[in-house]
Image (cartoon, helix red, strand yellow):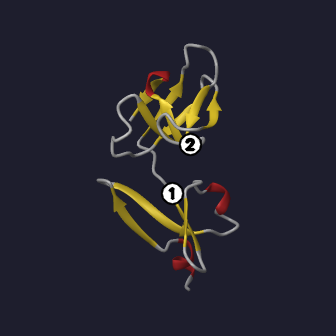
Amino acid sequence: MNKKSATTLFKVAVVGLIPITLTQATPANAAIQSRSTISETSDSLQLVQTPIGYCTVADPTGTPLNVRQKPNGKVIGSLKNGTIVALGVTDGSEGEKWTKIIRPLEGYVWSDYLTDCKY
């Protein structure tokens, strides 16, 4: 495999014009890649999701905002007020009250508790 193909295997456009690049994990780039991964038999590839926007967590109860595996699903983490989250692409099936986030962790949060959204 030549040097260029070792880092960038190919690029594809998914969901409109949002580019997604698949790169082979190396010690140099593994720390900066997204947590979302796919794997093949002998090579491990990482799928980097491109954020579609950013919002700030603002839960009026003052408690950390729960992040769920799926809408109304198991709680997988929580975020403090003031945390900036990166928004992910969805098909809308989760309903308008849930928002998919991809950073700082991947899951769903209650939309009413996000403010200052920039797309």
Residue 103 vertical placement versus 5 (above, below) = above
Hey, what amino acid is under mark 1? Val
Q: Tell which of 67 and 36 is nearer to you.
A: 67
Q: Residue at x 56, y 42 (%)?
A: 103
Quadrant location of the C terminus in the rendered image: top left
| Label 2 crowd bin: few (<14), some (14–19), many (20+), radius 10 Å | some
Q: Hey, which residue is sitting farthest front in the picture?
A: 73
Residue 115 vertical placement versus 35 (above, below) = above
Q: Hey, which residue is sitting farthest right in the picture?
A: 27
Hey, what amino acid is under mark 2? Arg
Q: From this viewpoint, is residue 86 visible?
A: yes
Per the image, the residue denoted by label 1 is: 48
Q: Which mark is residue 103?
A: 2
Residue 83 vertical placement versus 74 (above, below) = above
**Left or right relative to 75: residue 15:** left
Q: Hey, which residue is sitting farthest top in the picture?
A: 61
Residue 82 vertical placement versus 95 (above, below) = above
> In terms of secondary structure, where does tag 2 sit?
strand
**Left or right relative to 65: residue 28:** right
Q: Residue at x 56, y 86 (%)?
A: 1
Q: Hey, which residue is sitting farthest left in the picture?
A: 16
Q: Tell which of 51 and 90 is nearer to you.
A: 90
Q: Tell which of 46 and 74 is nearer to you.
A: 74
Please provide percent x and percent y for residue 102.
Answer: 52, 44
Please provide percent x and percent y for residue 58.
Answer: 54, 20
Please provide percent x and percent y for residue 114.
Answer: 48, 25
The span from disc 2 to disc 1 (Cα, nearest Å) is 11 Å
